[in-house]
Amino acid sequence: MFLDPKIFPFTAQLEDNWSKIRDEFLALPDNAFDPWVQQQMHGQGWDVYGLFALGEEIAPACEKCPETAKLLKQIKGVSLAGFSRLAPGTHIEAHVGWAKSVYRLHLGLVVPPDCSLRVGEDTRDWEEGKCLIFDDTVEHEAWNHSDRTRGTLLLDFLRPGVKDFNSDIVPEQVLQYIKQLQSVTL
């Protein structure tokens, strides 16, 4: 299920500043990205550059993306944030997320044609400079049928009325990856 981004006032700030965010995304070297931690579940071709994990800033990463980090710090209830890349020809198989306390946002940064996201029965295309918000606990899948990489800002934030994300049972491999991110100087 997709939600209307206008319900969440901070989305206007992200959309107004999307080109600055995109420029920081594009300035990152390829080797700064890691395969999505649960790639054995979702397949190859999806990688990420983490900026926030379990509500904590990953300082060395944020230093490399100061404009993006500044915007993210203004959003109350950020759980997870970073850049997400989907390689050409990639299809992330249908799956459900583990975090019931958050909604997931994608801000389109580099969006070639033939890139889509299905949540439940609804399929949408990403658009550069526009936010998509969805419930990650509803079955979803994504694909990039183009010959170029798709890039988004990925952000998990607390659902309205939820005070914290401590009730979520975080998969062990995700916890290990977060520890790795927090211990590395980028």
Image (tube, rainbow, N blue to C red):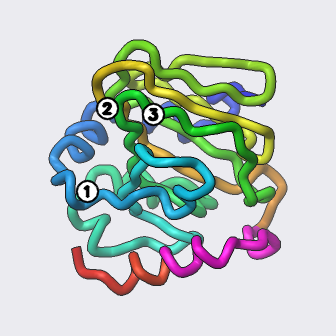
Image position, residue 91 (x, y; %): 53, 33
Magenta residues span: 164-177
Q: Residue at x 41, y 57 (%)?
A: 35
Q: Is residue 55 above or below residue 87?
A: below
**Circle 1: is it few (<14), some (14-19), or many (20+) Cα within 10 Å?**
some
Label 2: state its secondary structure.
loop
Q: What separation in Å lies between label 2 and label 1 (alpha carbons)? A: 20 Å
Residue bearing mark 2? 149
Q: Amino acid under label 1?
A: Cys
Numbered disc in front, either 2 or 1: 2
Of marks 3 and 1, the one in the foreground: 3
For the point 25% across and 56% down, the residue is 65
174 or 68, which lies in front?
Answer: 174
Q: Are marks 3 and 1 in contact (CB under 8 Å)?
A: no
Q: Quadrant of residue 92?
A: top right
Mark 3 lies on residue: 90
Which residue type carries mark 3? Thr
In 3D space, how far apart are the residues under numbered discs 3 and 1 (Cα atoms)?
A: 26 Å
Spot occupied by residue 102 in the image (x, y as percentages of width and height): 72, 54
Which of discs 2 and 3 lies nearer the camera? The answer is 3
Residue located farthest toward the bottom when viewing the structure as drawn: 183
- The CA span between labels 2 and 3 is 9 Å
Q: Hey, what amino acid is under mark 2?
A: Thr
Q: Is residue 16 visible?
A: no
Q: Is residue 10 magenta?
A: no
Dot 2: few (<14), some (14–19), or many (≥20) neighbours within 10 Å?
some
Read off the residue under disc 1: 65
Q: Earlier in the sequence, mark 2 or mark 3?
A: 3
Decide if residue 27 is on the left or right side of residue 35. Answer: left
